Amino acid sequence: MYSSKLCIFVINTYLVVTLSEENYLKAIYHLGKQGSVAVSTNAIAEKIESKASSVTDMVKKLAEKDLANYVKYQGVTLTEKGRLIAALVIRKHRLWEVFLVEKLNFTWDEVHDVAEQLEHIKSLKLVNELDRFLGCPTHDPHGDPIPDKDGNYAPIKSVNILEIKKGEQGVLALVKNSSDAFLKYLNKNNLALGDVIKVVDFEPFDKSLTIETAHQKMIISNEVAKNLYLRL
Amino acid sequence: MYSSKLCIFVINTYLVVTLSEENYLKAIYHLGKQGSVAVSTNAIAEKIESKASSVTDMVKKLAEKDLANYVKYQGVTLTEKGRLIAALVIRKHRLWEVFLVEKLNFTWDEVHDVAEQLEHIKSLKLVNELDRFLGCPTHDPHGDPIPDKDGNYAPIKSVNILEIKKGEQGVLALVKNSSDAFLKYLNKNNLALGDVIKVVDFEPFDKSLTIETAHQKMIISNEVAKNLYLRL
DNA sequence: ATAAATTTTTAGGTTAGACTAAATATTTAT
DNA sequence: ATAAATATTTAGTCTAACCTAAAAATTTAT
Ligand SMILES: [Mn+2]
Ligand SMILES: [Mn+2]
Ligand SMILES: [Mn+2]
Ligand SMILES: [Mn+2]
């Protein structure tokens, strides 16, 4: 998907991207389908918890460095370079999350803040050795795919639980929301990645769902259901 | 050595110390016997590769935060708080160095730069779990002691090879210089931590030393000898 | 004891990355 | 089509962490 020439370029320029720039690239990547769809400065500001005016400044700098495409009033996309750097930051983030859960006894709701720091550590050897040490995992503790060293990952094949027919079941493979509140809700209700979940009933009134797991039968709100993805 | 009240205080204020402040605290700690002996702004500037005028600014800020004691023209020492924070940063640095060597196939000359980044990651759980995961090591890959969670470590009991009598031997336990050049010299000459080294002869002319290991007999310069410490 | 050399501080300036408030462009509603 | 609402950019500030050059203090040499 990315040329090896580009990879080598990025590897060499890699070190001159600041922590703040990495966070912007990541935000644009996440908001705009890997940076391919234009995102507004406002959307970025909200994601990054800053102000639109700060985003305008930074986005100009990214365009200057050929990491983003920016047209006034028309939003931002990523260049190939920008997209690859973003993917490599996300790769590190997710590998560190695996490390924290698998090796250091963190729970899936504890890893994100620390991974936000670790994702900025700059060392190619570190990330590649970490990958090897963890057994080259393909998914992080929340079911998100881990990009390989070229920034690529297999397309997600899980489907939202709301699109599954009554009576059918699947394995919980991905949670689309990694917020503390949501993950703690799942913990409290004994729902974890890998659980087999069966859709028992759908309530048209509030669009809630009755589901059944090995442990229990329970009702989940539409809001919760939106964030649960199953592998069939 | 540190009161637990202080530890709790530091744990709570910990997060408001910047990366740059941590580096200054570490420099003062290393230059002035754990910060107990006054160090000059020039010495700090050289260590940190900055300018004395920048150090003066920062040192005022550290004094402001009650992390350092600073009297104009008379150098800097650390307060108890400053000393503990410095020790905890060094703890992280050395634990990460162990991790890199033991788990990620780094060599002892490759770890320092990455550890310089990792030492600033802020998470109490991370450092304590890392410690446990590594089996609570007491020394890093260069033989330096690892402070415990209260910042304490056992006094070093190794002795410089120049102080050992002809004919006696010991185990290489510490290298006082972790520069790339020095560690690569040791690699090239097959000298590693844990090796048994015997002092065969001392040459008064240039103060060089003839030593013998399991693999070889060789001459080392006084410059090299100064950095080798043995456990008897 | 005084002058010279050295060290340290002060004064003033730069840059990255943030902010607020005002100006301008775009979108939505009438 | 025009006005109102919303989104975005510009202009001007701020702070942390650096810097250089000049001033002041301290140390060393005569
Ligand atoms: Mn995360
Ligand atoms: Mn995740
Ligand atoms: Mn080191
Ligand atoms: Mn070390």
Image (spheres, coloured by chain):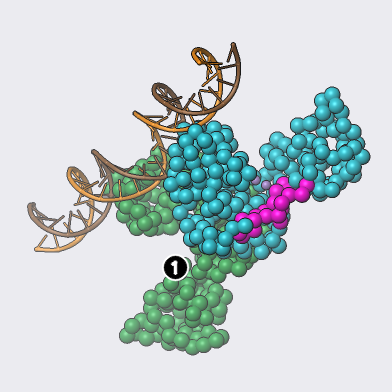
Chain colours: A cyan, B green, C brown, D orange
- Residue A120 pos. (x, y %): 54, 51
B118 w.r.t. A168: above or below: below
Find residue B145 and report its image quarter. bottom right
Q: Residue at x 53, y 40 (%)?
A: A76
Mark 1: give few (<14), some (14-19) or many (20+) Cα within 10 Å: few
Residue under the point 78% across and 47% down = A158
Q: Is residue A23 above or below residue D9?
A: below
Ligand 1 sits in quadrant:
top right
Please provide the residue range marked out in magenta. A138-158
Number of numbered discs on residues: 1
- The answer to whether residue B210 is left or right of residue A90 is left
Question: In the rendered view, would you say B164 is above or below B24?
Answer: below
Q: Is residue B194 visible?
A: yes
Numbered disc 1: secondary structure: loop
Q: Position of residue A179 (x, y in %)?
A: 68, 38
- Nearest to the observer: residue B115 or residue B26: B115
- Residue A144 magenta-drawn? yes
Question: Residue at point 41% right, 76% down?
Answer: B224
Residue A108 lies left or right of residue B50; in this view the side is right
Left or right of residue B131, residue A221 in this image: right
Residue identified by numbered label 1: B179
The quarter of the picture where residue A209 lies is top right
* Percent coordinates x, y for residue D14 in the rendering: 38, 32
**Where residue A1 sits in the image (x, y, percent)?**
62, 57
Q: Residue at x 86, y 43 (%)?
A: A197
> Magenta region, mostly helix, strand or loop?
loop
| Mark 1 residue type | Ser
Indicate yes or no whether the magenta region holds residue B72.
no
Question: Nearest the camera: A125 or B50?
Answer: A125
